[in-house]
Amino acid sequence: DANESNYYLMQGNVYVESKQYSLAVKALTKSITLDPLNIDAYYARAAVYALTKDVQKMCVDLQQLKNMQQAKGTDLWNKFCQDKKNQK
């Protein structure tokens, strides 16, 4: 349900503002689970992963955005993740 997904997105953003990153990830993941096409939730969760230096998980979310043909997500993936996949 998109409304419930957006509720968790907003909750996640509140957690980010108060630097409660693990709670933010949980809320944003719930948002994505409820609406797998919630682009804003992917961007927000990728940002949390960037803040917590979890590049691998950040790149997974940016890959999802790239797959959804999001220009900004694609640009970020190209900038931060493209070379990483070749190092595995």
Image: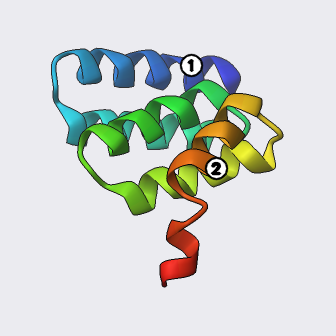
Q: Residue at x 22, y 42 (%)?
A: 22
The residue mark sitting in front, 1 or 2, is: 2
Task: Tell me what residue is drawn at x 65 percent, y 53 percent.
Answer: 63
The earlier-in-sequence mark between 1 and 2 is 1
**Residue drawn where x is 27% and y is 23% of the image:** 16
Question: Mark 2 belongs to which amino acid?
Answer: Asn
Question: Residue 4, located in which quarter of the rendered image?
Answer: top right
Residue 13: image x %, image y %?
36, 19
Tell me what residue is drawn at x 46 percent, y 43 percent: 29
Residue position marked by numbered label 2 in the rendering: 78
At label 2, counting other C-alpha atoms closer than 10 Å, the crowd grade (few under 14, some 14-19, many 20 or more) is some
Expressed as whole percent of the image width and height from the top left, the position of residue 66 reads 73, 46
Identify whether 9 is placed above or below 32: above
Q: Nearer the viewer, residue 79 or 70?
A: 79
31 displayed left or right of 64: left
Horizontal side of residue 76 vs 19, given as left or right: right
Residue 2 versus residue 83: which sits nearer the camera?
A: 83
Determine the secondary structure under disc 2.
helix
Label 1: element kind = helix
Residue 70 x, y percent position in the rendering: 76, 34
Find residue 50 and report its image quarter. Answer: top left
Residue 70 is labelled as: none
Where is residue 5 shown, x and y percent of the image? 58, 27
Instruction: Locate the N terminus and report the quarter of the image it occupies.
Output: top right
Q: Which residue is label 1 attached to?
A: 6
Front residue of 83/9: it is 83
Q: Residue furthest right?
A: 69
* Residue 72 location, quadrant: top right
Q: Residues within 10 Å of mark 1 (few under 14, many from 20)?
A: many
Amino acid tagged 1: Asn
